[in-house]
């Protein structure tokens, strides 16, 4: 029993500490996310359209500042910017109960998203720096599994707060989130320093430093294609649920089972999916497996328009299982690419560039995939699958181009 339990835990003390940090972070965020729709409409006084508009504007601003914030992480230190961002985010959540109207909401969302983007760049670069090469992807897989545990716990706490149907309790939700995030931020300050905490612009390296990440076109294209594969989340959270409700005879309660299955698979199988992903070649293989699951999900779900009863239920569930497989292998591939194709001296900047590419590859998908599936039926599902196949085919040449870009200046990509 002990041996089986140990297999479910991260291999090293540091990986276990970072997994615990992931649970803390996700619990705090999960509580607020669960109650955010009610909080924004009933407490802040917004319409649903205003909530969506604010999120969109904040997303655009964050997109424009992704690379500069990544550079800031390189200059100040990856752990430092991550910790500063975490403390700032916690403080901002304390301000939510005092925000009223769209203007205040929009300002808060922009600041929170910018602070979060800086923290994301610092966190991503830190995890690449702090782990030995062969431990990076596996450790990040454990951290992703821990995130799912935390978000599930946060959803339970948030659901409990909503169950009271009391606005005073709803106002307390961001305060609870802030307290958890303060603990999380303190936890981050206790982590060991990473290997490249010096300012990149002032660092004396044994080898030359490559030019900026935005000039690495292969890397940007690779992450745009990876963003296309990452649209498995659009299928998972938007298209398949809408399809189930509008185009099949499956009961709506099945949605709860679908998301429950996804959570269990993400917790139990993410590490297995990441096993052996430790090079550009194995990352490309993981991308191909992800694409295969993605396409299979499209082919399974499209036939449920004409099935009935238990056949529909089983096929929709199987479609959700396969798209979850796409999620698990795409995540593993992404970590592998970031480990192998980031300049060790500019990892924060490369995190920002990856976010740019990923956004370009995925921002259009909710509208496009929903339209294709809901309006064009079988043809639409086949087009979605074809988009994924084309993106996957482009990943190999773009990854090799990114390798050549770094190799041209002798940058070690496995540091």
Image: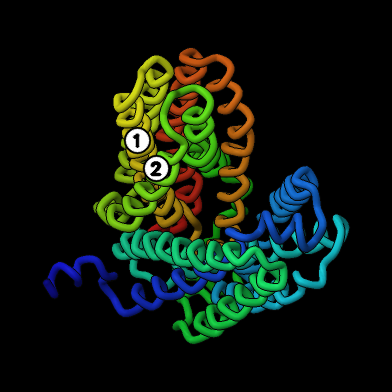
Is disc 2 surrounded by few (<14), some (14 to 19) or many (20+) residues within 10 Å? many
For label 2, the residue is 258
Q: Residue at x 61, y 76 (%)?
A: 176
Closer-to-camera residue (238/90): 238
Q: Position of residue 357 (x, y in %)?
A: 59, 43
Q: Residue at x 45, y 17 (%)?
A: 382
Q: Secondary structure at mark 2?
A: helix
Q: Residue at x 36, y 18 (%)?
A: 307
CA gap, disc 1 to disc 2? 6 Å
**In this rendering, position of residue 117 left or right of residue 409:** right
Residue 49 marker:
none
Q: Position of residue 408 (x, y in %)?
A: 48, 48
Are the residues at dot 1 and dot 2 in contact (C-beta closer than 8 Å)?
yes
Question: Quarter holding the C terminus?
Answer: bottom left
Closer-to-camera residue (399/309): 309
Closer-to-camera residue (285/90): 90
Q: Residue at x 62, y 60 (%)?
A: 35
Task: Classify 235 as above or below 166.
Answer: above
Question: Quarter holding the N terminus?
Answer: bottom left
Residue 84: image quadrant is bottom right
Is disc 1 surrounded by few (<14), some (14 to 19) or many (20+) residues within 10 Å? many
Q: Position of residue 98 (x, y in %)?
A: 81, 72
Total count of labels: 2
Q: Secondary structure at mark 1?
A: helix
Residue 317 marker:
1
Task: Classify 30 as above or below 258.
Answer: below
Task: Classify 361 as above or below 413.
Answer: above
Decide which of tag 1 and tag 2 comes sooner along the chain: 2
Q: Could you tell me if residue 415 is visible in this image?
A: no
**In this rendering, position of residue 409 left or right of residue 325:** right
Q: Could you tell me if residue 386 is visible in this image?
A: yes
């Amino acid at each position: 029993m002990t041996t089986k339990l140990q297999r479910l835990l991260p291999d090293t003390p540091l990986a276990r500490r970072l997994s615990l940090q992931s649970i803390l972070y996700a619990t705090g965020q999960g509580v607020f996310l669960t109650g955010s729709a009610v909080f924004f409409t009933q407490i802040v006084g917004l319409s649903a359209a205003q909530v969506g508009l604010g999120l969109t504007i904040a997303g655009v601003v964050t997109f424009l500042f992704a690379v500069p914030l990544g550079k800031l992480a390189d200059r100040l230190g990856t752990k430092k910017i991550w910790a500063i961002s975490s403390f700032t985010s916690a403080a901002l959540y304390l301000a939510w109960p005092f925000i009223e109207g769209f203007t205040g909401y929009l300002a808060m969302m922009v600041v929170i998203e910018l602070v979060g983007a800086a923290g994301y760049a610092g966190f991503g670069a830190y995890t690449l720096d702090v782990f030995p090469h062969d431990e990076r992807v596996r450790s990040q897989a454990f951290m992703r599994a821990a995130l799912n545990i935390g978000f599930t716990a946060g959803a339970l706490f948030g659901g409990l707060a909503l169950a009271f149907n009391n606005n005073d309790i709803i106002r307390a939700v961001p305060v609870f989130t802030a307290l958890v995030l303060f603990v999380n931020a303190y936890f981050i300050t206790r982590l060991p320093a990473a290997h490249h905490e010096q300012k990149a612009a002032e660092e004396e390296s044994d080898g030359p430093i490559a030019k900026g990440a935005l000039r690495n076109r292969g890397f940007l294209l690779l992450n745009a294609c990876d963003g296309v594969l990452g649209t498995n989340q659009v299928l998972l959270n938007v298209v398949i649920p809408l399809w189930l409700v509008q185009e099949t005879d499956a009961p709506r309660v099945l949605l709860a089972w679908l998301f429950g299955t996804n959570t269990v698979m993400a917790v139990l199988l993410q590490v297995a999916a990441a096993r052996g992903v430790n090079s550009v070649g194995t990352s490309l293989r993981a991308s191909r497996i992800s694409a295969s699951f993605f396409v299979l999900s499209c082919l399974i779900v499209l036939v449920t328009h004409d099935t009935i009863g238990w056949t529909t239920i089983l096929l929709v569930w199987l479609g959700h299982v396969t798209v979850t497989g796409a999620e698990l292998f795409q995540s593993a591939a992404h970590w592998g690419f970031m480990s192998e194709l980031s300049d060790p001296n500019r990892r924060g900047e490369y995190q920002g560039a990856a976010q740019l590419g990923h956004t370009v590859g995925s921002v259009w998908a909710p509208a496009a995939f929903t339209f294709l599936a809901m309006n064009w039926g079988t043809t639409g599902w086949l087009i979605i699958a074809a988009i994924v196949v084309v993106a996957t085919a482009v990943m190999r040449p773009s990854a090799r181009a990114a390798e050549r870009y770094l190799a041209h200046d002798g940058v070690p990509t496995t540091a």
